[in-house]
Image (cartoon, grey):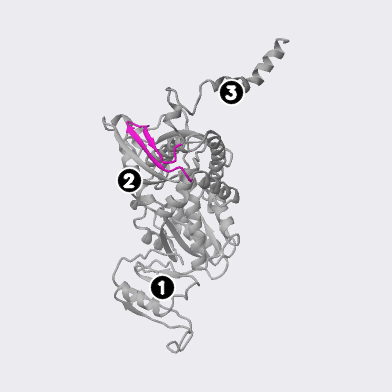
């Protein structure tokens, strides 16, 4: 059973309960409880006695259903705006019963709510995932969803799952797309889409929807996850269907349907933020010849303004997975958040690149990945001690394909899962620690140690040793260079 975040803005809650006949306490098909419950704990008690589940929200008409049959709620407003009426017949484009919408509270997704109801005659469940985008982006979502006409808002904290089950496997694999991109957005989409599929099952939805445009990669990442985890779900992508072409059209549609237009200042950049990175696209960045403006950056300082004194950090790693910082163990999300703060202070992790999108076009993006850059360098450097030459070469070659699969949204593809099993096996002995120096935008390795190190000082030293006889090199060179010698002999007619 998915765990839903309770949202409560007042101590007085109106509750309408509907329960099935389960014992002699219920003498009809429905039990109506139309009184105010003073506390969340009293609501919890009613939920337990009815063998159901509840989400708490300010002024919410709640429907309690038996366990494993989903959770439904209708948001109601005291402002007089009717957001609980759902079209009984089909919409302009067909009929769906309930749609789970990936919801941010911005203009686009706020407009999608009434558009779905109008065009598909459905209830809309807004879903928001917390993947570390920041508390400001989560503020006021309940009020926005209610005002847009949603019947329910579900918020899930996915930060630990995101880092542990998505970021760290990519880190262990050494996945990096087109030499630079550490896959921040690519890794976040499947964890969000998976949660949407879970919520759809819980609330009994027959469709899912997202606000991705028809020109980007994210539409593919969301929908491939939907296909892989529940091929029976319908998928609605409004940007590929509606006549809205830009911000002004969206504002006009919102006003027409009495949806309050978000009053936040429109950023000139298109951004995506999570616990791993922050991406910037659009405006002057659309010309690859333009240098990014310094006031664009949000996670990192200008390297020239970073501290004049370097900072040393020691990263502890177990089987290819980071576990500690300077000897202190952290949870995955805590470790990354701490390193983001440290790395950002030193201007670490800025990347400016032109990449090839999955849909065929090139795009220019600027990425800030301070903590991720530190961890990527640490894991890679420890492998220089624990993996032999052939293993590193094979691992690096597979890492390219692994990154391509993640970038393309194929997280739940059996090929990526099989490659991940290989990566897990091959890094079993990648355990130890790496010391890094952070200084004005640079990450330098200053030390590495591992109980599984393949480096032997007694062999590598220039001093004579018992294991390595330098005279043996002569025969090795003659055999290793034999093909080159034979070709030269052929060219000279020898």
Under circle 1, the secondary element is: strand
Please state which of residues 412 and 241 is positioned toward the viewer in this rendering: 412
Q: What element carries label 2?
A: helix
State the image coordinates of residue 42 (x, y, percent, origin top left): 32, 76
Q: In which quadrant will I find the C terminus?
A: top right
Q: Looking at the rendered structure, which numbered label has been put on residue 476?
A: 3
The answer to which image quadrant residue 491 occupies is: top right
Pick whichever of labels 1 and 2 is earlier in the sequence.
Answer: 1
What is the residue that sits farthest to the front in this orientation?
466
Q: Residues within 10 Å of mark 2 (few under 14, many from 20)?
A: some
Q: Which residue is drawn at 40% across and 71% down?
A: 54
- In the image, 51 versus 134, the foreground residue is 51
36 on left or right of 233: left
Q: Main secondary structure of the magenta part?
A: strand
User: Judging from the image, what secondary structure is the residue with disc 3 in?
Assistant: helix
Residue 112 is labelled as none
Give the crowd class for mark 3: few <14, some 14-19, many >=20 residues within 10 Å.
few
Decide which of 82, 379 is in the foreground and name it: 379
Q: Disc 3 or 1, which lies upstream in sequence?
A: 1
Residue range of the region highlighted in magenta in the rendering: 428-453
Dot 2 corresponds to which residue? Answer: 338
Q: Where is residue 389 in the image (x, y as percent from the top left)?
A: 53, 33
- Closest to the camera, between mark 2 and mark 3, is 3
Magenta includes 438? yes
| Neighbour tally class for label 1: few under 14, some 14-19, many 20 plus, Cα within 10 Å | many
Residue where numbered disc 1 is placed: 62
Magenta-span inclusion, residue 146:
no
């Amino acid at each position: 059973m998915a765990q839903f975040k309770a949202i409560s803005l007042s101590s007085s809650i109106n509750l309408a309960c509907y329960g099935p006949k389960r014992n002699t306490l219920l003498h009809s098909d429905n039990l109506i409880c139309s009184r105010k419950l003073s506390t969340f704990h009293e609501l919890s008690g009613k939920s337990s006695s009815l063998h159901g589940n509840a989400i708490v929200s300010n002024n919410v008409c709640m429907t309690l259903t038996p366990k494993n049959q989903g959770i439904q709620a209708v948001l109601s407003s005291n402002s007089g705006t009717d957001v609980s009426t759902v079209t009984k017949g089909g919409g302009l484009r067909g009929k769906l019963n309930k749609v789970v919408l990936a919801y941010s509270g911005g203009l686009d997704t706020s407009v999608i709510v009434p558009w779905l109801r109008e065009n598909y005659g459905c209830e809309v469940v807004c879903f928001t995932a917390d993947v570390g985008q920041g508390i400001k982006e989560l503020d006021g979502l309940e009020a926005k969803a209610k005002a847009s006409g949603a019947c329910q808002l579900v918020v899930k904290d996915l930060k630990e799952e995101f880092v542990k089950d998505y970021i760290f496997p990519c880190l262990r694999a050494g996945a990096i797309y087109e030499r630079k991109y550490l896959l921040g957005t690519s890794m976040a989409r499947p964890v969000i889409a998976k949660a949407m599929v879970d919520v759809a099952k819980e609330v009994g939805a027959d469709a899912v929807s997202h606000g991705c445009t028809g020109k980007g990669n994210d539409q593919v990442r969301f929908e491939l996850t939907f296909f892989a985890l529940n091929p029976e779900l319908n998928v609605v992508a409004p940007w590929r269907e509606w006549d809205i072409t830009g911000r002004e059209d969206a504002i006009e549609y919102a006003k027409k349907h009495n949806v309050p237009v978000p009053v936040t200042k429109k950023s000139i950049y298109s951004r995506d933020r999570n616990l791993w990175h922050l991406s910037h696209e659009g405006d002057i960045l659309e010309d690859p010849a333009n240098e990014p403006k310094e006031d664009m950056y949000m996670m990192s300082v200008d390297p020239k303004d970073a501290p004049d004194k370097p900072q040393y950090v020691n990263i502890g790693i177990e089987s290819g997975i980071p576990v500690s910082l300077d000897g202190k163990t952290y949870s995955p999300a805590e470790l990354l958040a701490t390193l983001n703060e440290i790395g950002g202070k030193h201007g670490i992790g800025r990347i400016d690149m032109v990449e090839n999108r999955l849909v065929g076009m090139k795009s220019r993006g600027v990425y800030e990945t301070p903590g991720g850059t530190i961890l990527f360098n640490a894991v890679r450097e420890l492998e220089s001690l624990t993996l032999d030459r052939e293993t590193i070469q094979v691992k690096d070659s597979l890492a390219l394909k692994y990154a391509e699969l993640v970038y393309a949204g194929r997280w739940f593809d059996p090929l990526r899962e099989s490659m991940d099993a290989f990566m897990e096996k091959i890094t079993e002995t990648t355990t130890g620690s790496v010391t890094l120096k952070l200084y004005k935008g640079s990450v330098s390795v200053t030390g590495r140690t591992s109980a599984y190190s393949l480096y032997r000082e007694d062999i590598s030293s220039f001093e004579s040793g018992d294991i390595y006889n330098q005279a043996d090199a002569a025969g090795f060179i003659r055999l290793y260079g034999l093909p080159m010698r034979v070709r030269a002999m052929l060219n000279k007619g020898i």
